[in-house]
Amino acid sequence: MEKLIYLIGIIDPIIKIMGFFAFMFVGFSVISIISMTIDHIFGNVFDDIKHKRRLKKVLFVFLLPFSIILSSIALFTPNSKTIACMYVIPRIVERKNLQDVPDKMINLLNQKLDEWSKAEGK
């Protein structure tokens, strides 16, 4: 359970880092595609044929697939609050000794959940 709580705590920075790198790789891919298009239309931007082949290989073998994978992971990975709602709250509800929780505690939990949902909406 401690490892799950730790993973829930660090998932948000990991998603941000993956999103940043995905953004950078998409940017590099777009710049590469634009430069190859300009070279194709106007010619003489890349005089060296070997350089053209290397750029195409890097673009289509590494940059585009890696940026698609990172973007997909960053997009579809839930944030820490969603993971907590999916895994921690059902385990708390299942425990029999927590079934007799006072009403004040339930109201406090409901208020915190409302605050979290409002913070997510911003």
Image: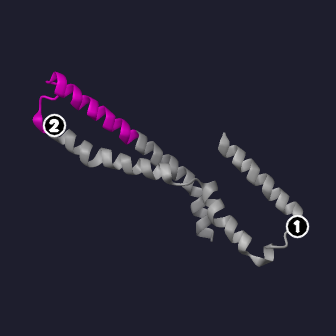
Magenta region: 24-52
How does the figure colour the protein chain or chains? Answer: one colour
Query: Residue 43 in magenta?
Result: yes
- Of the residues tagged 1 and 2, which is closer to the observer? 1
**Under tag 1, what secondary structure?**
loop
Compared to residue 116, the image places residue 102 above or below, namely below
Separation of disc 1 and disc 2 at Cα? 71 Å
Q: Quadrant of the N terminus?
A: bottom right
Q: Position of residue 4 (x, y in %)?
A: 59, 67
Instruction: Check residue 32 in the rendering and tell me which mark sits there, or answer none.
Output: none
User: Is 25 displayed left or right of 116 in the figure?
Assistant: left
Could you tell which of marks 1 and 2 lies nearer the N-terminus? 2
Query: Residue 70 in magenta?
Result: no
Q: Which residue appears at 16% of the width and 29% of the height?
A: 46
Q: Which residue appears at 88% of the width and 61% of the height?
A: 104
Q: Which residue appears at 46% of the width and 49% of the height?
A: 18
Instruction: Check residue 51 in the rendering and tell me which mark sits there, or answer none.
Output: 2
Q: Amino acid at mark 1?
A: Pro
Which quarter of the picture shows residue 64?
A: top left
User: Label 1, on which residue?
Assistant: 102
Which residue is the extreme one toward the bottom? Answer: 96
Q: Which residue appears at 20% of the width and 40% of the height?
A: 56
Which quarter of the picture shows residue 33?
A: top left
Crowd tier of the residue under label 1, counting other residues whose Cα lies within 10 Å: few below 14, some 14–19, many 20 or above: few
Please name whichever residue, 115 or 17, is drawn nearer the observer in this view of the structure: 115
User: Is 108 displayed left or right of 24 in the figure?
Assistant: right
Overall secondary structure of the magenta section: helix
Q: Quadrant of the C terminus?
A: top right
